[in-house]
Image (tube, helix red, strand yellow):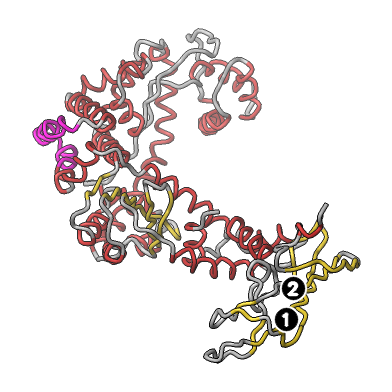
Amino acid sequence: MDVSTLLADPSAISLDTFVSRQNLIIVRVRAVQKAVCCPLCNEPSSSLHSRYVRQVADLPWHGVAIRLELHTRKFRCRNKLCWRRIFCERLPKVVRSYARQTVRLNSALTLLAFALGGEAGARTASELKLTVSGDTLLRRIRSSSVQTNSSVKTPRVLGVDDFSFRRGISFGTILVDLEQRKPVDLLPDREAETLKVWLDGHPGVEIISRDRSGSYADGAGRGTPNAIQIADRFHLLQNFTKLVERFVNRFQSLLVSATLAINKEQTSFHNSADKKRLTSMLSALSEKHSQEKRERRFERYQKVIRLHQEGLIHREIAAQTGLSRSTILNYLKTDAFPERQRHSTSGSILDCFLPYLHQRWSEGCRNAQQLWREIKQQGYSGTHRMVTRYIARLRVLGVEVPMIRDIKPSDGKTAVFKTPSTKRAAWWLLQSPEDLKSEQQIFLQQFIDLCPEALKIQELGQKFRAMIRERLEPNFDGWMEAGQESGIKELENFVKGIKQDRAAVKAALKFEWSQGQVEGQVNRLKMLKRQMYGRANFDLLRARVLHRV
């Protein structure tokens, strides 16, 4: 085997000898170029001036550190017009000027820095016998980002989306070339002016895919007036789903009524006099606590409304009330105090096991965990929390707990339809009947019978989903007119918002471009950000996101 092939550039350096030491191999190499060009005037010269030695680290061999003892030279420049008289020999494929590491070692460290970051990259490098600190790797990222930024090419089809530096507090913008399927730049915020400035400096964008953010629409419109803006179809479907959830939330009481109608014929438990007596006792016990909790929530709701009217932003309201920003947003977007959904009294999976629980209670067993284990062996599929809560309420009633004898023993398989959440009920309304279970279809029919407006929401919702998914542009104007004349305020507000972004929504039905690629790049960005353990400054994050191996 020719050992010279292991060298970085066999045409420029030659191997003299090896010196083996403990945990280190010193490789003595010599520069052998016959003519060397002056770095200033590029004039070749063979006039030797002197020799000197450079100590350079190289890639390890089989886990052993390597150090090059590089014997190189200085030459005289014979170009009389050049002010550089003496220059050092350049070995661009071996080592850069003033560097203490070979080019290939530096490339390996840069690759580790981009792949793993600072400290994680340093730990990995140590296992590979590469001595480097985390800060040095971060400097590698920053120095390489200059070359990355200079090679940014203006895309024809641009995807725009936001991401968070700190969730809910500070945001940035990612720009993605949808044709090349790669990010082209990151912006430090999500303001319209910032996007406009970037587009002004990168002319040539013909199509811009974005979500329904007003700031991006404004920035794209001012930065590239002639570009086609495309609203993302997924966000349109998501917006419509939220619309249906707000509609269903207005009729929460009807969800309970529809559930009662379904369960009325499924259980004989409602005819039990003991059950009615026990339900009355337990309800009276918990009514006081429920009322106290409602009063506390109502006081918080009034405080949020008052602070909002005083001009405080969401973050300041959250600091004063101790509520989450999502709760504050829910309070502010409702017209009145949102009452909590009451649980259906139609029964639960625990009802079939109440006779056994009452029998064991009368025998003196008060351990909820023990009772849960016993009924679990009989087929109970619920968690211990339901049993614990029920036993806690029986403990307060004490000896007054009635015995229930007129319920037939159950095999644990009796199904009780539970009242769905507003989110789940809204989702059922938007699904085709073939994709729903029989009890779900019956529930929807009961709900529609109680709320005729739900039928109109269901029909228009399914038409909207089909129009968006299949990109049926000819159906757009007819659907908009039907939505505007529906008489449902949530739907009318949605149509009003669509009209403000009409051109972008129609373009979404005409072109195939969407935010799918952009969302994938945002997911990659989040992974890189979390991998950096709090050191994801904008310049480092930008360099790593734009880097391509």
Say whether residue 102 is left or right of residue 206. right
Indicate the position of residue 162 as horizontal and vertical percent values.
37, 55
Q: Give the SS element for disc 1.
A: strand
Residue 412 seen in the figure: yes
Determine crowd level at label 2: few under 14, some 14-19, many 20+ residues with C-alpha closer than 10 A.
some
Instruction: Name the residue nearer the viewer: 328 or 161.
Output: 161
Say whether residue 451 is left or right of residue 135. left
Instruction: Name the residue nearer the viewer: 212 or 318.
Output: 212
Measured in 3D between alpha carbons, the distance from the residue under mark 1 to the one under mark 2, in whole angstroms, is 8 Å
Is 395 above or below relative to 197? above
Indicate the position of residue 4 as horizontal and vertical percent values.
78, 60
The amino acid type, in three-letter code, at marker 2 is: Ala
Tags 1 and 2 touching, CB below 8 Å: yes
The amino acid type, in three-letter code, at marker 1 is: Arg
- Please tell me which residue is depicted at 53% across the width and 10% down the height of the picture: 410
Is 354 above or below relative to 51? above
Is 380 above or below relative to 482? above
Task: Tell me the residue that label 2 is attached to.
Answer: 31
